[in-house]
Image (spheres, helix red, strand yellow):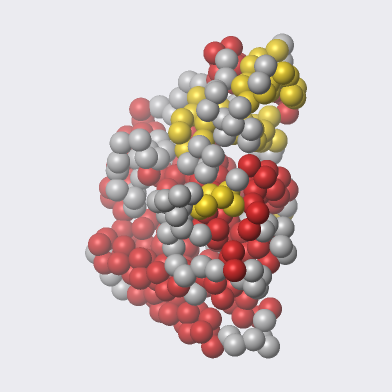
């Protein structure tokens, strides 16, 4: 079993990373701020525009440490990786399997996403039975109907329509899952580019973290992260990572709800731009990333492998299962389902 190592998050936008022996050095405005051994790192996520030294890039590539550059809002910019671990035979198999089994993969992927969404809704209903739960009960019913409808059609556009309609209804009611009454966390739907409220800013940031982890996992098992089965191919987009993140969005959503409901985050952790866009500020990012690293070390029992594993290993487990399916070692790819 793969060991979960640390991820180094560099949130200071003025930071510059360099190599000193077997350690990464983070300098800010010419002054060394921190030194950390590379041996304990799995990846580095840098929210800095200053970048890092070529020597550190080469060392990370050689040692298999994923070096990722993101904007302050968590949007992926670039990644430095070593030699590609896949081979032409795996890539050909991936293309063939995805073409031949696209409908089945899409159906299971969407069904898992909506079933996990319903799990979160049902959890709120159980925890807050004294409140007005009728709207959430109706949402749960509609989500269940959507899952059933998915297996009633083989038309990909119709499947996208079912998913889109269910997602719209879910996010219209997402505010009912939030118990923090602060005006800062009022949400009336999903907004992405850019996020227009604090809740959407937090969700977008967490989704970006998940997508980044899944892309790294796919590269590790030799799959082409840019060749998906559901999201339309687009230059520069890791479509397969976007596909697999649909199954695990529920983890980010539940995590976001926890941060808000426990008042770990407040309005002071977000900045509102003149355009109306809302993003986590530096203090907010630090809080989220610290708690996210803790979340990745929590364990759960994976229903397929039958073992307790850390949440941080989930991208590698799902990527591994998908690779086994592509290679013909298992008959069906089992998507992630919350229990």
Q: Quadrant of residue 259?
A: bottom right
Classify 101 as above or below 219. below
Image quarter (top left, top right, bottom left or bottom right) of the C terminus: bottom right
Residue 196 coordinates in the image, percent (x, y): 46, 58
Residue 327, placed above or below residue 257: above
Image side of residue 5 versus residue 72, left or right: right
Instruction: Name the spot of residue 15 as percent of width and height, x first.
Output: 63, 26
Residue at horizontal 67 percent and vertical 45 percent from the top:
283
Q: From the viewer's side, name the closer residue of 122 and 255.
A: 255
Q: Is residue 291 left or right of residue 235?
A: right
Residue 335 visible here? no
Q: Quadrant of residue 103?
A: bottom left
Of residues 197 and 217, the one drawn nearer to the viewer in this rendering: 197
The quarter of the image holding the N terminus is top right
The answer to whether one can see residue 161 in this image is: yes
- Report how many numbered discs are placed on residues in the image: 0
Residue 35 spot, x, y in % from top left: 75, 22
Residue extending furthest front? 274
Of the pair 20 and 163, the residue shown nearer to us:
20
Residue 270, position as x, y percentages in the image: 59, 52
Q: Residue at x 65, y 54 (%)?
A: 268
Residue 199 left/right relative to 19: left
The residue at the point 30 percent across, 36 percent down is 235
Which of these two is toward me, 307 or 56?
56
Residue drawn at 68 percent across, 67 percent down = 261
Q: Is residue 52 above or below residue 229?
A: above
């Amino acid at each position: 079993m793969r060991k979960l190592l640390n991820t180094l998050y560099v949130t200071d936008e003025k930071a510059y990373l360099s190599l000193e022996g077997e350690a990464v050095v983070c300098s800010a405005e010419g002054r060394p701020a921190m030194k950390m051994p590379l041996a304990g790192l799995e990846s580095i996520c840098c929210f800095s525009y200053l970048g890092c030294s070529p020597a550190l890039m080469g060392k990370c590539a050689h040692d298999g440490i994923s070096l990722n550059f993101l904007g302050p809002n968590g949007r992926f910019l670039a990644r430095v990786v070593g030699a590609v671990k896949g081979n032409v035979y795996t890539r050909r198999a991936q293309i063939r399997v995805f073409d031949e089994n696209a409908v089945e993969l899409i159906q299971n992927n969407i069904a898992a996403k909506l079933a996990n969404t319903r799990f979160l809704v049902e959890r709120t209903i159980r925890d807050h039975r004294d409140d007005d739960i009728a709207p959430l009960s109706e949402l749960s019913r509609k989500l269940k109907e959507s899952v059933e409808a998915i297996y009633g059609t083989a038309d990909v556009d119709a499947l996208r329509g079912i998913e889109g309609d269910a997602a719209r209804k879910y996010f219209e009611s997402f505010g009912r899952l939030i118990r923090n009454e602060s005006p800062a966390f009022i949400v009336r739907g999903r907004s992405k580019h850019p996020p227009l409220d604090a809740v959407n800013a937090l969700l977008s940031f967490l989704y970006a973290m998940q997508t980044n982890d899944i892309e790294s996992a796919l590269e590790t098992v030799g799959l082409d992260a840019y060749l998906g089965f559901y999201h339309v191919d687009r230059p520069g987009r890791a479509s397969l990572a976007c596909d697999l993140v649909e199954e695990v969005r529920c983890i980010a959503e539940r995590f976001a709800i926890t941060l808000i409901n426990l008042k770990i985050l407040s309005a002071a952790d977000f900045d509102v731009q003149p355009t109306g866009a809302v993003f986590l500020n530096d203090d907010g990012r630090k809080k989220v990333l610290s708690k996210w690293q803790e979340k990745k070390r929590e364990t759960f029992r994976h229903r397929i492998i039958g073992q307790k594993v850390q949440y941080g290993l989930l991208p590698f487990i799902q990527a591994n299962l998908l690779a086994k399916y592509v290679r013909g070692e298992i008959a069906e790819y089992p998507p992630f389902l919350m229990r």
